[in-house]
Amino acid sequence: MNIAQGRLDYGPPVAVIDIGSNSVRLVAYEGLTRSPTPIFNEKVLAGLGREVQTTGLLAADAVEKALVALRRFRALCDRLAVAQLWVIATAACRDAKNGKAFVAEAEAICRTKVDVLSGKREAELSALGVVSGFHRPDGIVGDLGGGSLELTEVHGQRIKAGLTLPLGGLALQDVSSKSVKKAEKIVRAALADARLLEGGKGRTFYAIGGTWRALARLHMWQTGYPLHVMHGYVMPAREAFEFSGLVHRVDPEMLSRIEVVTDARRPLLAYAALVLENLVRIARPKDIVISALGVREGLLYSMLDAEEREKDPLIAAASELNVLRSRSPAHGEELIAWTDRFIASSGLDESAEERRLRHVACLLADIGWRAHPDYRGEQSLNIIANAAFVAVDHPGRTFISLAVFFRHVGLVDEELSPRLRELVSTRVLDRARVLGAALRVAYLVSASTTGVLPKTPMVVERGRLLLRFDNGFKELAGERVFVRLRQLARLIGREPVMEAA
């Protein structure tokens, strides 16, 4: 099979089919890597768990809808030449009396075993999804599906034993006979004994699940938030508490911007909001952070070897984009060492996280080179700000975007959205300008070719910003290079000097 130039050759794709209580989803990935990239993603809202709490059975029409979806998904996997397919099922299939019969049919269609996850295993994989998608996570992971809520405590790569509760949106709707007031009593009673939540005070609550994402999307649009990326979206706990209370007490159709939530999700919004409000009330976290990664990504992460797990997924994703889009991927690597030397000599203090983000910006600095020169900055900013990166918060991705934007357009920001600037502090904006100015020097000196930057180091010495040209490279010095060096020198309060060794 020919490999498209826009793809990385990790061998044949891998895929996961997730048979949930509300949706059945297929996600095919480019390969099994630390930052797996989806090449196909489709879901069908079958509603398998719609009546399980009251009848004990998967509804016949939901079963038929799910099986039709599985036949299509298996055919798609064949067309995609998927090498490894994992099929998992959650609360509805494990709780329903006819769950085993449905699973047997599903296995025949998918031509592979369906792993019906226990509540404990589902909680573990949800937590691993957060471990795979956040840089040093710390707090409580909550995965709200259609049938159940899984709760787990996570600190770095350490996961404590989790628990599962029958508080999924469909389950609550079913057992409460669609009464939100009855559902509230059920939620309060179920969470009252959840001792795990005691460890959430002042920490982060990581929210997983389609209905919680819909709730966050509604909040995002109502507040006019400038970055429409769900993963890493933060709601302060108090704000999440008040917003959740509003959502489950009013008719969803009356809410502003309700159109950003699909019709199928709207009936479940009140139950998701109800659960979140009570979780915040009991756990008292600092903030709610939305995770787009959950059981599926946790499953893939669990398949990686120890060395691959230790990789930084943000660096891994940036390295892949560097290979796919830059003129010279090795030049991006050289930029990291070149700016390391500059920053170390500059006297600018830099945290470990700021250093990490600077390295990512170096890898992504040339991904917009094919665009028209007038739009390279804007296009690069939009690609980075909205990329499916994980392990980076919104201020972090904004810093990276701005640094690459300044590298292309210069140190002006009239074209920037003022709302986007609000996502970062004055310090972060200043650092983005400094890095952007440094990248402008590097690219003019090297023309994005390798082997130049190691021979043209830029350092601060004796109060001067010195750009040195080693033997054989002095011809690369020029007036335009000095102009850019002077711009950077002004930002850091140094005198610009160019000299040949």
Image (spheres, grey):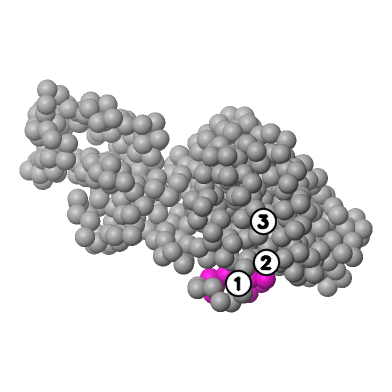
Asked which secondary structure carries label 2, the reply is helix
Residue at (54%, 61%) from the top-left corner?
243
Residue type at mark 3: give it.
Val
Which residue in the protein does label 2 denote? 268
Asked which secondary structure carries label 3, the reply is helix
* Mark sitting earlier along the chain (1/2): 1
Between 475 and 214, which is closer to the camera in this rendering?
Answer: 214
Q: Position of residue 42 (x, y in %)?
A: 64, 63
Q: Quadrant of the C terminus?
A: top left
Q: Is residue 258 in sight in this rendering?
A: yes
Q: Position of residue 384 (x, y in %)?
A: 40, 53
Rendered image: mark on residue 250: 1
Between 486 and 184, which is closer to the camera in this rendering?
Answer: 184
Which residue in the protein does label 3 denote? 275
Residue type at mark 2: give it.
Leu
Q: Does 53 sit above or below residue 348?
A: below
Residue at (24%, 61%) from the top-left corner?
415
Q: Is residue 83 in sight in this rendering?
A: no
Residue at (14%, 29%) from the top-left corner?
466
